[in-house]
Image: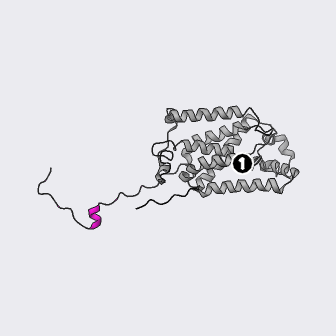
């Protein structure tokens, strides 16, 4: 029997839904708002460490004061500087969010996306308390998905080794314990390059703009995804039953030999 044909573009719906939400928001900002309206929207939805000054909160109305201190921990992740910023995050989310979404399921993945965004904002706040520069972009959540993915995609029988086979069980291989990851040279090299890249680019502006990469948020989201993986990882689905004996399927009883073994 021929194996079922695999779709070339096979991204989980929840990942596509997140990308669609981010894309629609960016299109609304880019083509539906002027500069002043965009600024007002950023005040309400971007993560701004300076707003956590209690003196300022006492004088601001709730929709630009106390309210955003809560919801901007996640809303900032749905806003991007420009199309290049959105496209880069989208490509990485498709690459690493796809295996994670297939393993977690839609609801767990969406919660995971929001939690890692909040962790990234918290890490940035801890380092830049009082800073007026707004933080936007899904990079913390993308980093969290990347960290969660490396817990299992490199495992024997996992998505990397089963690439192209279409085996759904590849996404349910046991995740690598954190202590074991530090003995895997592939994962250590991956972690070293990832952290070095974020620290390096965190010191320079994004090409073509005066924006600085919020590397602290990236690391916060990454660590949340790496360490908190087990909190979201569901139990694996039951394995399919082994194939029945061919003779039993045909309805024949096996013949007994004349001699016994004991």
User: Which residue in the rendered view is the most extreme toward the left?
Assistant: 258
Magenta highlight range: 236-262
Do we see residue 153 in this rendering? yes
195 is higher (above) or lower (below) than 38: above
- Give left or right: position of 152 versus 72: left
**Residue 209 x %, y %:** 80, 40
**Residue 48 x %, y %:** 78, 43
Number of on-image labels: 1
Is 131 in front, or is 148?
A: 148
- Give left or right: position of 228 versus 48: left
Residue at image point 48% right, 49% down: 170
Q: Secondary structure at mark 1?
A: helix
Prevailing secondary structure class for the magenta stretch in the rendered image:
loop
- Give left or right: position of 50 versus 119: right
**Residue 195 x %, y %:** 63, 34
Q: Is 135 in the magenta?
A: no
**Residue 225 x %, y %:** 60, 43
Residue at image point 41% right, 57% down: 240
Classify 10 Å Cα crowding around label 1: few (below 14), some (14-19), many (20 and above): many
Do we see residue 76 in this rendering? no
- The residue carrying mark 1 is 86
User: Which residue in the rendered view is the most extreme toward the bottom?
Assistant: 251
């Amino acid at each position: 029997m021929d194996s079922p044909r695999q779709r070339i573009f096979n991204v989980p719906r929840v990942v596509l839904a997140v990308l669609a939400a981010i894309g629609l928001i960016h299109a609304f900002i880019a083509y539906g708002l002027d500069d002043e309206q965009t600024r007002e929207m950023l005040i309400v939805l971007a993560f701004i460490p300076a707003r956590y000054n209690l003196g300022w909160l006492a004088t601001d109305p709730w929709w630009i004061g106390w309210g955003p201190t809560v919801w901007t921990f996640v809303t900032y992740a749905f806003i991007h500087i420009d199309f290049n910023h959105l496209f880069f995050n989208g490509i990485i989310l498709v690459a690493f969010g796809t295996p994670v979404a297939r393993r977690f399921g839609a609801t767990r993945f969406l919660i995971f996306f929001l939690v890692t965004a909040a962790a990234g904002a918290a890490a940035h706040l801890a380092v830049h308390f009082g800073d007026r520069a707004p933080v936007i972009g899904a990079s913390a959540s993308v980093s969290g998905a990347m960290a969660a993915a490396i817990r299992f995609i490199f495992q024997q029988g996992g998505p990397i080794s089963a690439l192209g086979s279409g085996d759904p069980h590849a996404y349910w291989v046991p995740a690598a314990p954190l202590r074991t990851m530090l003995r895997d040279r592939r994962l250590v090299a991956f972690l070293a390059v990832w952290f070095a890249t974020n620290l390096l680019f965190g010191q320079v502006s994004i090409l073509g703009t005066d924006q600085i990469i919020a590397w602290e948020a990236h690391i916060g989201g990454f660590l949340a995804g790496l360490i908190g993986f087990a909190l979201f990882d569901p139990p694996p689905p039951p394995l399919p039953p082994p194939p029945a004996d061919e003779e039993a399927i045909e309805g024949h009883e096996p013949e007994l030999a004349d001699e016994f073994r004991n």
